[in-house]
Amino acid sequence: MRRAWVLAGMAGIAGITGITGIAGVAGCGGRSAGEPSESAAEVVQARGALDLLARGDVDTFVRTWDVSTRPADLAETVGQVAAGFPHATPDRVRPVGARCGSVHEVGGLTTETCVVTFESNYADGTIVSEITLRRIGGDERRLVGFHATALPAPLAVVDAFTLSGKGPVHFVFLVTIALVEGVTLLALVIWFRRRKTVRRRWWSLSIPAGAVTFLLVHRRAGAAPAVSPPVISPPAG
């Protein structure tokens, strides 16, 4: 009897640990680590383009666009996006992501593309912007794309894990994951205590299954932060 209560207690601890882990991963949203340096060349150039957009300086923004990919209605599109920015100085603007990749053509030039993401915090909301820069060969980087998304609150608040507003499906999901972790730990303990090799094999099957399920849930929890619809998504070329 005492052994059964010990096993049940261990299973309960595993379940609580699982829910706590999911909450932690969901809360961080994968943004805190790896923020780009504000002094990086691509970040500085992207920040300059963002400042033009936020100030509504449409003409200068259009002139910095790569001529080879400049659409005919670019000025109109930029004006629409600029109108979505608050007419006020942001409390804070910080880079929250930067992705750069290169493609080399055999016998040709190397094309480097960088996408820099910024979070601009205003008194009445937040705007997350993406500025896309491209460089071909040894030329300078040129603006080839942008995107803006309006959020009701800073990313730290939007991505924070909370139980408010969750429906029955969410709670069933959390309880199910807690049970999976509990059964996994229980299977591991029983597997070590059983003396029959055949039974050990059957119990051991649930251990990797539970571990894989737990890892998949953790990766899913941090992969889909909630955001509102984009202000506008202009074509990149």
Image (cartoon, rainbow, N blue to C red):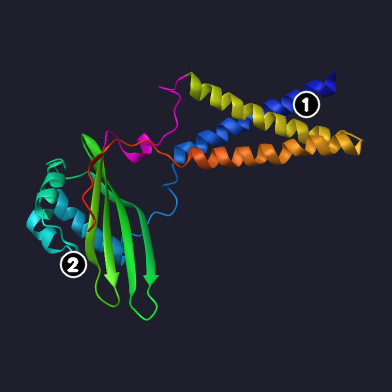
- Look at the image and say whether residue 159 sits in the magenta stretch: yes
> Which numbered disc flags the more N-terminal residue, 2 or 1?
1
- Which percent across, then down, holds residue 18? 60, 33
**Amino acid type, callout 1:** Leu
The image quadrant of residue 203 is top right
| Residue depicted at x 16% and y 49% | 54
Quadrant assignment for the N terminus:
top right
- Which percent across, then down, holds residue 208? 70, 41
- Which percent across, then down, holds residue 198? 88, 37
Instruction: Determine whether the residue tagged by mark 2 lies in a helix, strand or loop.
Output: helix
Residue 13's place in the image compared with 140, above or below, is above
| Residue depicted at x 49% and y 24% | 170
Quadrant assignment for the C terminus:
bottom left
The residue labelled by disc 2 is: 68
Residue 170's place in the image compared with 139, above or below, is above
The residue labelled by disc 1 is: 7
What's the magenta region? 151-167
Q: Can residue 130 be seen in this view?
A: yes
Q: Residues within 10 Å of mark 1 (few under 14, many from 20)?
A: some
Q: Give the mark toward the camera: 2 or 1.
A: 2
Comparing 11 with 92, the one in front is 11
Instruction: Tell whether 200 sits left or right of 185.
Output: right
Instruction: Tell whether 41 sits left or right of 10.
Output: left
